[in-house]
Amino acid sequence: MKSLQVIMVAALLTGLGSGCRHPMRKLTNVRLGMEPSAVKQAMGSPYSVRASKVFENEETTYVWEYWPPFFSLNDQKVHIVFENDKVVQWGIPGDYNTGSYSSIREYKESKK
């Protein structure tokens, strides 16, 4: 019984301690215009590349996704958006969208 209590306390402390590794805390180190290598240094490697696109004019857009630690009380994911290897926006998915979908008239291969 005592060993079960020790395991439960250890799991709780691990969960609480993992909050400092949460990507939301590390976002204070991210700046507009950062390159991927600098973001990796500040945030660590992303959990995944959520989306990417190469346009006809060779411009690129991609989104890195960071997940919270397994035992985190905060389950929010963080996205960092790059255009042409520079950070252009970041945040919780959905918080940084601008404009409305009703204003989008058609899909275009080029961003221009």
Image: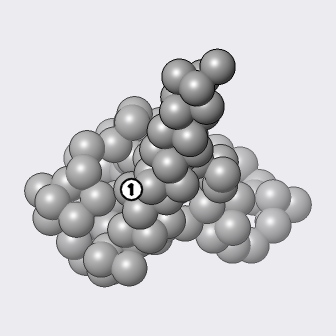
Along the viewing direction, whichever of 26 and 57 lies nearer the viewer: 26
Percent position of residue 73, x then y: 66, 51
Give the quarter of the figure containing the C terminus.
Answer: bottom left
Identity of the residue furthest to the front in this view: 2
Give the quarter of the figure containing the N terminus.
Answer: top right
Percent position of residue 24, x then y: 49, 65
Q: State how the image is colored.
A: one colour
Question: Residue, x 20% and y 54% (percent of image)?
Answer: 40
Along the viewing direction, whichever of 46 and 73 lies nearer the viewer: 73
Percent position of residue 71, x then y: 56, 40
Position of 97 compared to 41: left or right? right
Question: Residue, x 34% and y 43% (percent of image)?
Answer: 46
- Residue 2 image-quadrant placement: top right
Along the viewing direction, whichever of 110 and 66 lies nearer the viewer: 66
Along the viewing direction, whichever of 65 and 111 lies nearer the viewer: 65
Using the rendered image of the protein, determine whether residue 92 is visible from the camera's viewpoint.
yes
Question: Residue, x 39% and y 36% (percent of image)?
Answer: 47
Q: In this view, does 85 lie above or below 7?
A: below
Q: How crowded is mark 1: few (under 14 residues within 10 Å), some or many (20 or more)?
A: some
Q: Name the residue under label 1.
A: 21
Q: Is residue 98 above or below residue 67?
A: below
Disc 1 residue type? Arg
Question: Residue, x 22% and y 65% (percent of image)?
Answer: 42
Q: Is mark 1 on a helix, strand or loop?
A: helix
Using the rendered image of the protein, determine whether residue 83 is visible from the camera's viewpoint.
no
Percent position of residue 97, x then y: 67, 66
Q: In this view, does 38 lie above or below 2?
A: below
